[in-house]
Amino acid sequence: MSGSLRRAAGSLLVVGLGGAELTGLERAWLRLVRPGGVILFRRNIVDAEQTRLLLEEATGLGALHAVRCVDVEGGTVNRLRDAIAAMPSAQAVCSASSPRSPSARDRGHPFVHPTHAQKTRMDGAQFSLAGGAPGGDASKQIPYGNDRKKSKGKNLARVHGELVARAVRAFGFNTTLAPVVDLVLPESIEVMGTRAPAADPEQVTEFAREFLRGLEAQGVAGCGKHFPGLGGAEGDTHFVTPAIHRTWKQIWEEDLAPYRALHAAMPMIMTNHAAFPNTKGGMAPASASRFWITKVLRERIGYKGIILSDDLEMGGILKFLPVEDAAVEAVRVGTDLLEICHSAELILRSFEALINEAERSAAFRTLLLERARSCERKRARLYAGGAGRAGGVAKALTAKQLEKLRDEIGRFREQVAAIASAQEVEARATSPAERT
């Protein structure tokens, strides 16, 4: 039983690494923990060949069907920016796609309530990388770019998703932690910068729908974030547990509109570390709340995919619970995968805490083993091999193909800038999300 508990506990962790190569110590604890996934940051990424080798070795020491994830949203949060190219932000693409949408300069204006948010539904069935986009071939690249005849009528958000997917695939990833579907609200402007697409839930939903279609067409899993919404957060969850004083009605009708409309198209959803005191969630961070994860996301919205916690090293959760308790509570309230991005010590403490709680409590042991089995099935479905893929990982590109992709990203960035330059506002240079 002890061996099965250890395997189960490790398979629920998505872990970070220290540098561009594994150290002997990292190899040792990866063999012990056998995590369900790896997340890389700029500190880990030099070029495509090195990154693919690092991912291959790290995930080879982990659980089957491992998540290989990276934050590539575009804009300020793009861990591949130095290695391949800068990508326009979600806000710039959304603004260029919807010229009548509230611009970044209008973010302080009163919110306009949606009227058709529930009518926006993703076409097709539950997300699957193996099948590609509905009615399409995932192995075919859709033409776009500065050729106006080819790109006329082509949705910019979908092109954005396709380019993000092609970039992360080239580096050996199978998942990008995007799109952000938080709303552009006055409270969070300083923290979120240009990461949030728009103020109007309908426009956020439309952007996310097309972005996800672009990812799916290229065989990459996306992750909607940060559930149930950070638009109303004045504080930064990297450091504090913000209290978001929005009502349940506001959250349900506005912040949750993208999740309600697109949950079947989101392979993963990431929970945040903010509290919502005007709801039944009270002062507990959403990432440690049964109300938000089980009652709202699973039961009321009907989400069936993978629920991923935001980094358990962040102040937003650690100011509420020690990391050991946070890991146990996140699993207890319904989380599938726990993200711990930096510290080997905190990874090991969380791993041992899950095992210790399972040995102490028969109920938690049953829960842990079932959660591990369920999550393994979900990962297997997501990352099943398809044409040109092995275990959800794309074939390496040649140097010429990488250079071509770099040029395509550059042309797309120029295209978006030409449309949206009057509306674009840069995020603050010291955005915590971009420090790693």
Image: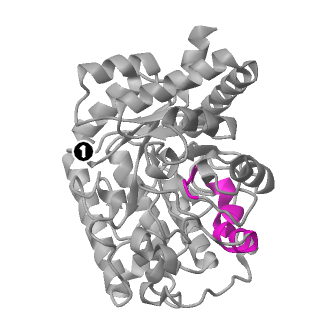
Q: Report the span colored magenta.
A: 248-274
Secondary structure character of the magenta stretch overall: helix
Instruction: State the colouring used for the structure image.
Output: one colour
Depicted 427 relative to depicted 394: above or below? below
Does residue 57 appear to the left or right of 223 in the view shown?
A: left
Height in image: 304 above or below 159?
A: above
- Foreground pick, 402 / 431: 431
Residue sitting nearer the eye, 379 or 13: 13
Is the residue 429 above or below the residue 78 in the image? below
Q: Kindly identify which residue carries mark 1.
A: 43
Asked if residue 122 shows in the view, the reply is no
Res 326 quadrant in image:
top right
Q: Is residue 271 magenta?
A: yes
Identify the residue at horizontal 26%, vertical 58% (top origin). 81
Q: Which residue is drawn at 55% across and 58% down?
A: 226
Residue 1: horizontal and vertical position, in percent?
A: 64, 8
34, above or below 104, in the image: above
The front one of 337 and 190 is: 190
Q: Tell me, yes or no, if residue 50 can be seen here.
A: yes
Say whether residue 221 is magenta: no
Q: Give the class, few, some or many, for how many residues have Cα within 10 Å of label 1's Cα (few <14, many ≥20).
A: few
Image x and y of residue 32, in percent: 43, 16
Report helix, strand or loop for mark 1: helix
Count of marks overlaid on the render: 1
Residue type of the residue flagged with mark 1: Arg
In the image, farthest residue toward the right: 300
In percent of width and height, residue 381 lies at: 61, 36
Percent x, y of residue 404: 25, 59
